Amino acid sequence: MKNILVIGGGGFIGRNIVEYLVNRGDCNVTAADIREGSNWQKLSSNEDTCSRFISVTADFSDMRAFDKLNQSYDEVYMLAAVVGVNRTLKFPQDVIRTNTLLTMNTLDWISRNPIKRLLFASSSENYAGTSDLFNTMIPTAEDVPLCIGDVRHPRWTYAMTKMHGESAFIHSADSYNYECTVIRYQNIIGPEMGFGHAIPHIVERFVKMKESPFKIYGHDQTRAFAYIDDAVKGTVGAMECDKAAGEIYHIGKQEEISMETLTTYIGELMNYTGDYEAAMTYPGSVSRRCPNIDKAKAHFGYLPNTDWKKAVNLTTDWYKDFFASGKSPQFGGFETPEAVLKKIKK
């Protein structure tokens, strides 16, 4: 059986990949993260899965954490990163430091511990500047030039670390004798996805703030939302594809909707009957984003088939229950664009 390591296996996408692989039954999976995944205890206590699952809780921005891992793996999913627009705006120095250390520490460990293949999780943020500044084609393919806007804007710190990661892993593969594949996630949604994102913010406002009229921030901006189950299958498909060595793939859904459409649909799900009004967008937010996924379809049959309404419905249900219970997120909760802008100016 293959031995697989998922660095970042406690995060939203990571823990879903871990559970998918463990339940598939043909590999041993080590999940490594600074925090435990919400499904780790279930996997470790289940008689059917416990023999195929190992968890390691440590801060992998500290090189000493890698001493807790085995010396070799067949496949490594490198998913760990500080992520979220709120974090980039509030703590840009932490985003730069942590994500860069995660990349360099992983490469240092690989240089001494052989692996066969690595998949690096990157982001559509890498070409967000290109979309707005140079009017690139949408849906956007993987060969688009990568760029950022004004380097002084903290929004771009995350994108810069992901560009660095793509280059670092791709160009180290030959020297360290492993195959490298890069995927760029494009607005992956689902239950328990975290709180620093549009859907949790919209649901939080409907449940707790009772706005009327309800403001639609960035109403005319567009995004393409993909459900977590589809993203997991696409990620594993990229890792296991014979053609994928040295390649970059978009993992998302090629179905563009406006923030107005998203917000009013969530309003329907929340039984909101009031009015809406257009409002300003968040600082640094791009106007359009939608991936071209033809390459992933051609190479490993990637086909995200969850309708966006179903994906949003499943995601909304989880957050509606969370906020209705009286709970509040530890971080990543809603802030108005005006409040965020004031913090940036400070």
Image (cartoon, grey):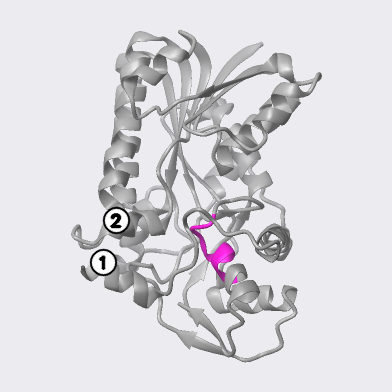
Q: Residue at x 68, y 45 (%)?
A: 229
According to the picture, the residue beneath numbered tag 2 turns out to be 156
Q: Is residue 300 visible?
A: no
Rendering coords of residue 99 (x, y %): 34, 38
Residue 9 on the magenta span = no
Q: Name the foreground residue: 76 vs 175.
A: 76
According to the picture, the residue beneath numbered tag 1 turns out to be 344
Crowd class of label 1 (few under 14; some 14 to 19; many from 20; radius 10 Å): few
| Residue stretch rendered in magenta on the structure | 195-202
Rendering coords of residue 174 (x, y %): 33, 18
Rendering coords of residue 31 (x, y %): 56, 25
Which residue appears farthest toward the right when viewing the image? Answer: 47
Residue 199 on the magenta span = yes
For the residue marked with disc 1, what is the amino acid? Answer: Ile
Q: Name the foreground residue: 26 vs 182.
A: 26
Rendering coords of residue 17 (x, y %): 62, 34
Q: Looking at the rendering, in which quadrant would you find the C terminus?
A: bottom left
Q: Name the foreground residue: 235 vs 106.
A: 106
Task: Determine the secondary structure under disc 1.
Answer: helix
Task: Give the mark nearer the N terminus: 1 vs 2.
Answer: 2
